[in-house]
Image: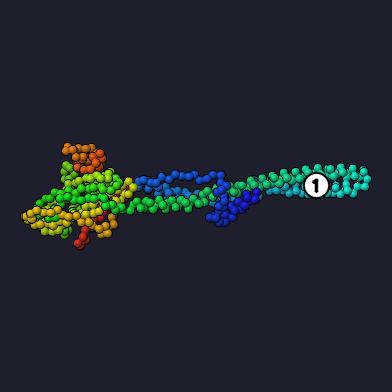
Amino acid sequence: MKLRRALATAAAVALASPVMLLSATSAFADTEPATQTVNQPKTYAELEKAAADAEKAYEDAVAAKAAGLEKLKATMAALALDTHPLKATALAKDAVAKAAAVDKTVADKAVIDAEAELEAAQDDAAKAKAQEALTTARANAEKASAAKAQADAEKEAAWDAWNDARIKAAQEYGLVQNAPEEALKIKEAAGKALAAAKECVRVSGLTVLADGLPSEIVAGTTVDFSFTVTNGTDRTLDVDPLAVVVLNPVKNMDFLKVEWSNGSDWQELDAGRNNYVATVDAMKPGDRSAVKMRLTLDEAAPSAKGFALFAGDASSAYNPCIHGPMKRYDYEVLPAGSEPGEIDDAKPGTVDDKDRPTPKPSPSVQGGTSTESVGTSGTPETTTANGSALARTGSPSVLPRLALVSGAAVALGAGSVFAIRRRKADNS
């Protein structure tokens, strides 16, 4: 009884300070919250779902706590009324117990009086009469004592039932009281994990390198070269090779034409803009893909300097934004008719990430693809939706899908060019 009353009192006090609610009740709870097995998200989609689920769980926990507190207040208020069935029963049993206590007191007094009468009796007749009265008084006292014990037990049980109802109400609230705090921790952790996955990951192993781009190009000629995408990382990537070819000053762009081969025909790039060329999906570690390109200068092209930028923007199942290092190749335009002799290839230089502006969202269009091998030379190829093909080196068991993707604009500045790099998260 004392334990129940102590817990019930604590529950009542908790109404004035819900945060301090009855820490002991969890030990007496009828049910415990179900233990959930949480699997670590393995993909970005799972991270997004985990964050959304955590947000919903937090909102539900806050709502459940508020509803639980209101229910607790209502239950406690109802139980406090003398008209509540449990309290009314306890009060009635309390009255019966008090009456039984009075009856026992009277009966005990009668025994004492009878004992006194017996002791005062002078003759046998008086003693016999007093003894009979004492026997009756003692019998009545025993009955009164038993009745009082029964009434006390029933009173105790009735008040226990009332206190148990208060404890149960407090226990129910205790199950949801701390849920928002715990759910908030999970929500914040899920949000941080999602935010971390959104951040662009810089990987040195994802390379896009030019091969055969000359350091000098004579106006009125066409030069053939290529670039090779290599996945030197330890993860499978979807890669968008970025190719930008620029002729300075900008007014000279009209003299420049840049194309890439999809295996059957040539696709023109938007010179001076960043172009996503030959998208490679599911590129496994160690895979390589080569793309042929050509650069044509108009015969009227003036002497100028130019450069080309190559990089790989990629995503994995877990990270939607992965960037490989950007390489810059400088070249010089020689006047038409020049005979420079043997020309060295342009040497790659690195463009520092700090010199690149923050990527801005840009629309992209990817063509549907098939994975049918159509090569006739034994080299694995992948066919695009329009029937063209691109040669690919590396693991022949996996044929990546290739598609032309439109790029965002390049920011041109005096003395430097910055390629705005698309975050693939924009279309995730």
Local secondary structure at mark 1: helix
Give me the residue at 85% from left, 44% from top: 134
Is residue 381 in view? yes
In x, y percent, where is residue 263? Answer: 17, 42
Residue 184 vs residue 239: left or right?
A: right
> Type of residue at label 1?
Ala
379 horizontally vs 120: left or right: left
Whole-percent x, y for residue 115 in the image: 85, 47
Residue drawn at x 86%, y 49% as measured from the top left: 116
Residue 27 left/right relative to 209:
right
Please name the residue that numbered disc 1 is placed on: 107
Which color scheme is applied? rainbow
Give residue 410's quadrant in the image.
Answer: bottom left
Residue at 87% in and 44% down: 131
Q: Residue furthest right?
A: 123
**Residue 305, image x, y percentages:** 14, 58
Q: Is residue 87 visible in the rendered structure shown here?
A: no
